[in-house]
Amino acid sequence: MGYLVTVILTVQMVSAVSMVGLILVQHGKGADMGAAFGSGGSGSLFGASGSANFLSRTTAVLATVFFVCTLALAYFGNLRPAGTNSVLERASVEAPAAASAPAPAASGAAQIPSN
């Protein structure tokens, strides 16, 4: 089970870094707006979209992989054996019993270090 979680986590990290890189490479739709009004050689309002289709589809695939990995990690993170309690419940059971008579509290003057 630990090996599978490690593989899923690795795939998620690779897809996240790749997705960030692809998003930074892409141009927004408003980036070519100036070229459409005479300052560049663009043929349409939003420029050529040949590379944009490839980049946007690759980004969509990586986003899908990222979300599937996230759901898988959440599922495997919530799997517990039947007899296991939460960490807080285990801590209260394993804690040692307190002494019957509490120790006397030290006065404030005894806590101040002397030179």
Image (cartoon, rainbow, N blue to C red):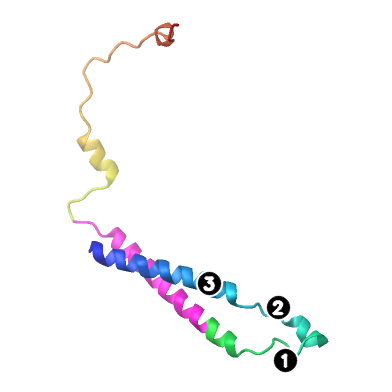
The answer to which of 69 and 43 lies nearer the viewer is 43
Name which residue type carries label 1: Ser
Q: Kindly identify the residue that appears in the image at 20 percent across and 36 percent down.
A: 94
Residue of label 3? 21
Q: Kindly identify the residue that appears in the image at 37 percent across and 70 percent down.
A: 11
Image quadrant where residue 3 sits: bottom left
Secondary structure state at the residue bearing disc 2: loop
Residue 32 location in percent, x, y? 72, 82
Badge 2 or badge 3: first in the primary sequence: 3
Residue 5 location in percent, x, y? 29, 64
Image quadrant where residue 27 sits: bottom right
Badge 1 or badge 2: first in the primary sequence: 2
Q: Which residues are magenta?
A: 57-81
Q: Please say if 68 is above or below 48.
A: above
Q: Please say if 105 is above or below 79.
A: above
Q: In the visual, does 54 lie left or right of 105? A: right
Q: Kindly identify the residue that appears in the image at 38 percent across and 72 percent down.
A: 68
Residue 98 location in percent, x, y? 23, 23
